[in-house]
Image (cartoon, rainbow, N blue to C red):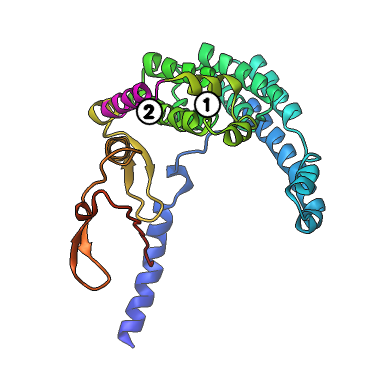
Amino acid sequence: MRAIALGAFLVLVGRPALWALDDPKDKPKAETPSKATEEVRKITAEYQKESSEFYQKNQDKLKEAKTDEERQKIYDGAPKSDKYVNRFLELAEKTPKDDPGALEALQAAFNYSGNDPEGQKTRDKGLDLLIKDFAESEKIGEFATQLVYKPSPKAEQLLKAIMEKNPKKENRGKATYAMGLYLKRMIDLGQQAKDPEQAKALEKYTSKEALQAAKEADPAKLEKDAEKMFEIVDAKFGDVELYKNFRTMKPVTLGEKAQGELFELKNLGIGKTAPEIEHEDLDGKSMKLSEYRGKVVMLDFWGNW
């Protein structure tokens, strides 16, 4: 009984102390978004609402469609992002560049721009503004890695501008890492473009300029240049945090990622000698991968979590 009473006493006594620790006065105030930032969020919400309503209305038709052509005909009626992208660009142009909303508007314009010629044209317009006014921005680093997924000469130019001009180490590091990934992406595009069917499919979501550059580039030079980018990252920006592991919440650094990319480039590419693997076969006997050199080998990696 004394233990229960003591516990109740400690809870009651402890509460004011906990309240003191949680005093709102001690907490940092959340940054009030600028009017431009609020407008970016408003435009984004409008586009997402229109898209969501379209897919809800057509989900049964999409399920019932029997061919890709039938499905594509339905998708062709989806809301176009062009009008929203143009609103983002107009907002960015009239907003002072020191307002966070200006950069957010340009990032939104990039992310929502389509891959048709008109979409690529508006995306390049946004990239021109980013190159001109935001290469030195303190908050451009997170955006740098997104440029890899929509390759174009303008995207490459922006990465170079960030690498050369940005005063913040973290941003230069992320841009350098993104440049390495960009060059790897160009190697992949060049290989895929050799197949006429794949090349036709690529034209739907890759700028013509990027695709042409990938076709004309020397893969060996691109690989060498990519290795150089990752080596610079490992040597100069290795301690920069890229993100946190969502399971362990431990930081994943640019150095770790760059080392992985270098290992892949040097050891896992087509025509490279496979790294040694030593393990037991299905009969429990020790085996080495090198013992099967010259033979066709299928490796099956699997896991159970």
Task: Give the alpha-carbon distance from disc 1 to disc 2, as whole Å.
Answer: 13 Å
Q: Give the structural element (helix, strand or loop) at label 1.
A: loop
Q: Which of the numbered marks, if any, corresponds to residue 180?
A: 2
Q: Disc count in the image?
A: 2
Task: State the residue at coordinates (49%, 23%).
Answer: 214
- The foreground one among 261 and 249 is 261
State which quadrant residue 226 falls in: top left
**Residue 141 is one of the magenta-drawn residues:** no
User: Majority secondary structure of the magenta segment?
Assistant: helix
| Among numbered discs 1 and 2, the one appearing first in the sequence | 1
- Amino acid type, residue under disc 1 in the picture: Pro
Quarter of the picture containing the C terminus is bottom left
Residue 126, horizontal then vertical, whole percent: 61, 19
Q: Give the structural element (helix, strand or loop) at label 2.
A: helix
- The foreground one among 218 and 165 is 218
Q: Please provide the residue range marked out in magenta.
A: 218-231
**Residue 221 is one of the magenta-drawn residues:** yes
Task: State the residue at coordinates (43%, 15%).
Answer: 161
Q: Looking at the picture, does residue 190 appear above or below residue 17?
A: above
Q: Which of the numbered marks, if any, corresponds to residue 151?
A: 1
Residue 30, horizontal then vertical, whole percent: 52, 38
Residue 56, horizontal then vertical, whole percent: 78, 53
- Answer left or right for 43 relative to 141: right
